[in-house]
Image: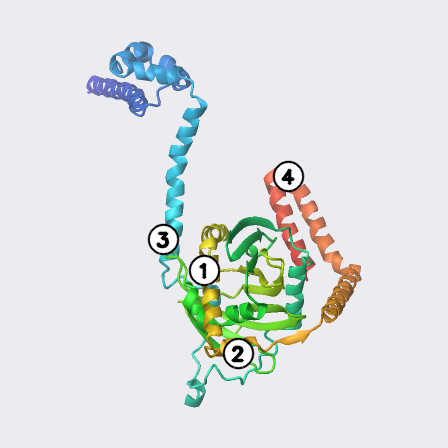
Amino acid sequence: MTSCSVGNRDNVDNNSSNEIGTSLCFIPCTFVATILDTKLFNCKAIISLSPYLFVSHPLFIFLPEFLVRIGSSTSNSIAMSIFHTPTFRDILSDLAMFITPLWIAVIVGVFVGWAWKPKWAFHPKDALTKLRFPRPPSNPHDQDHDHNSTTTSTSGLVTELDLLHLWKLVEEKDGGPAWIQMMDRSTPTMSYQAWRRDPESGPPQYRSRTVFEDASPELVRDFFWDDEFRLNWDDMLIHASTIQHSDLTGTMMVRWVRKFPFFCSDREYIIGRRIWDVAQHYYCVTKGVPCPSMPRHNKPKRVDLFYSSWCIRAVKSRKDGQLTSCEVLLFHHEDMGIPWEIAKLGVRQGMWGAVKKFDPGLRTYQNERASGTPLSPCARAAKINTKVTMDYLRSLENMTSDLLETESQDSSDKPVGRNIPKLLIVGGAIALACTLDQGLLTKAVIFGVARRFAKMGRRL
């Protein structure tokens, strides 16, 4: 019994040793086959595996002959791939093959995201309104309120500060970055120049200068203010209506709906506008204003940040040097809800196509006015201007500059005690970083958090 058990035990040990040997032989062979199959076979792989292949397992003494026999059909290509030094062109082609599909996927994803917007993807402000409790039904008479009524005051929509800001833009005194010219085109009866600049915060800003031959400033003023006629020549404008109007100052609140390319939905604008007459230089201010009586909708999407103002004045004609031409200086920027770089590309590509429609539209409008066509309500509102003098503008500029200096002095005279929390935060961060000796990454994280809290304390 004892001998039989010992014999069985020896057989088991022999079988297990054979299985271990088989597995040790199978694992390296499988790995080498994987290397050959994936074309990762190179000198570095063999050198890194040499301690295991030639020392731990004697079978791999014949590895070179084994590799030659297996890879005889592809030995030349493998050898060339081993000893071939890649050129700069090969590296660029490999990078292009790797990066191009990624960029194509990103661009397709961006365009698909603009074209298709799920219902659950809404603006955070709209989310707050959706979480509110429903209001009880209001009086039916209140629901039939006419937006064209003037019950709500329009005096605060566009103020003299807006006039001063436009005047500074015209005189290049606004203190913004320099303008970069992007276009200079002309026709026999019109010339056009355009500039762009990128502020530190906000969307890109545009400045343009358009000169119309044989046109008066009053005609051009009415032309750009007339929404009814704009629908005839402005292809992007698909709806225009007046919400409020003041017969005293000419201030208007209008609603526009404009269409954009296929990957963008239509955009809605609630615009406040007013005209000032400064020695027959017409400063026309239009900007986006809030309107609680006009609820928001998912489509068209409302544009809140919108500014498009211009100065219209007579200039000398390039033909005879007489004051028979009209100059329009336009300043425009808006946040349409798309990436600003994409918006700049679209503006640059479609700018001249939209601008060259100005002159035919103006000549048609000029002929209709000469034939005695009745004025539209918007054209009649364009004739209600607030007259101010240039001296008044300069005094307003001095007044605002004095107010800004006073505010800056008040901010500099704040007690030093408010800086104590900032010092405590920074000092505590230094002490904590020195205590926790966990490497550079931990210290960087601690200093970053302390810096964020210090900025928050500075705002307070």
Mark 1 neighbour density, 10 Å: few (under 14) some (14–19) many (20 or more) = few
Q: Find out whether the residues at labels 4 and 1 contact each other: C-beta distance under 8 Å.
A: no
In primary-sequence order, the first of circles 4 and 3 is 3
Q: Residue at x 33, y 10 (%)?
A: 61
Q: Secondary structure at mark 1?
A: loop
Residue bearing the label numbered 3? 112
Looking at the image, residue 386 sits to the left or right of residue 244; the answer is right
In primary-sequence order, the first of circles 3 and 1 is 3
Residue type, numbered disc 3: Val
In primary-sequence order, the first of circles 2 and 4 is 2
In percent of width and height, residue 208 lies at 56, 56
In percent of width and height, residue 262 lies at 37, 57
Mark 3 neighbour density, 10 Å: few (under 14) some (14–19) many (20 or more) = few
Quarter containing the N terminus: top left
- CA–CA distance in space, label 3 to label 1: 31 Å
Residue type, numbered disc 1: Lys
Residue bearing the label numbered 2? 380
Residue 314 can be seen, yes or no: yes
Residue bearing the label numbered 1? 357
Residue 293 can be seen, yes or no: no
- CA–CA distance in space, label 2 to label 3: 44 Å
Name the mark nearer the viewer: 4 or 3.
3
Q: Secondary structure at mark 4?
A: loop
Of 248 and 297, the residue lying toward us? 248
